[in-house]
Image (cartoon, rainbow, N blue to C red):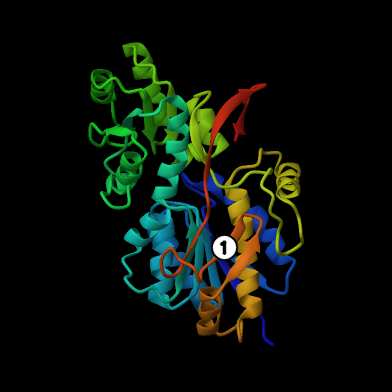
Amino acid sequence: MGEVTVGVVLPRTGRLRELSDPLEFALDSLRHTEFEVVAADSRSNPVAAQAAVRELGRQGVSLVLTLGGTHTLPAVAAACEAFAVPGLSTTLPWQVYRARRDVADPVWSFHFCWGLDDIAGAFADMWDGVTEHATVGCLWNDGVQGTALRDPANGFGPTAARRGHRLVDPGGYVELNSAFDRHVDRFLAERVQVVTAAADARDLAAFAATAGQRGLRPRLITCSRWLTYPFGAERAGLDGVGTIVAWTPRHPHRSSLDGRSAAELAAAYERATSKPWLQPLGLAHALVEVAVHALRSADDPRDRHAVAAALRRVRLDTICGTLDWTAGPAPSIARVPLTGGRWIRDHGRMRLET
């Protein structure tokens, strides 16, 4: 059998570069298999990401992997469809992923992640702890994230209404270029008890500063996106902020590749990088697990049609739990469960408490 190569598109440079660390680490597990690895820099840019897929396709890779980026990840998926290369991705809510790749019937692109409804459910569990019927202020931008969260069918509204919470949305703000007086005024007028966001850490910190100056003191702030990661929590400086939790070293699952526990994986990452574990580590490792499983189970791992067919039938117990492409929630999608947690400052370092 000839050489079988896996291509990886990751943000080694640009604003997403910190997300490349867990994927780079996970690739070590792939390099210890029978498969070769070729990596390409997306430069945190969708145009460069698409060009990377094109070049990897020319090099004859059997599969392309990627992780993270509201703009870059869908660009990779779209390029996989355009260039007929199987692709596997994670860390973008699956409804946002499907809406942004502009492919009604995907043949080549596969994805696993939680959904917007899962985020809403995890946050609603936390809002329930504040009050039975919370008035929730929405700090949502005017871009991709805010549009998705406002979607009447798939956004936060249906879950909030079903759980008895009331959303207050003053409208979108321009990311990294806004003052938040309008939002604070509305939240004060509506007696908001909880604020929920999908903000960049700098925007969330700016909002919190304005809220403090104006006397708005929500009993809880919940935020997904960058606040899912420790560097986001550090930059926002918000002790006690709530976020989503998809994976931690305390998860009870093990790697399908080598049997490592979640705790062992996190410890190995911290030893190797001198950085704290972060949630995408588990997802990156699962990405590699699924890739290896699909290639090994394909009728011919050098045949891209065979690899895509193998991905379509994957049901695998991974370090993130069971990933099942045969069960949906939509074609080419596998779901990752969520819970909620809070960032707590502990001896000068942010710790995720679940």
Q: Is residue 278 left or right of residue 217?
A: right
- Residue at image point 60% right, 71% down: 6
Does the rendering let one see residue 4? no
Where is residue 295? Give x, y as percent.
62, 76
Where is residue 46? Give x, y as percent.
39, 57
Q: Which residue is mark 1?
A: 323
- Residue at image point 37% right, 39% down: 163
- Identify which residue, 287 or 1, lies in the foreground: 287
Amino acid type assigned to the residue bearing label 1 in the image: Leu
Does the rendering let one see residue 146? yes
Instruction: Say what secondary structure mark 1 lies in.
Output: strand
**Quadrant hosting residue 136:** top left
Q: Image height check: is 160 above or below 217?
A: below
- Residue at image point 59% right, 69% down: 315
Where is residue 45? Give x, y as percent.
41, 54
Q: Image height check: is 21 above or below 204?
A: below
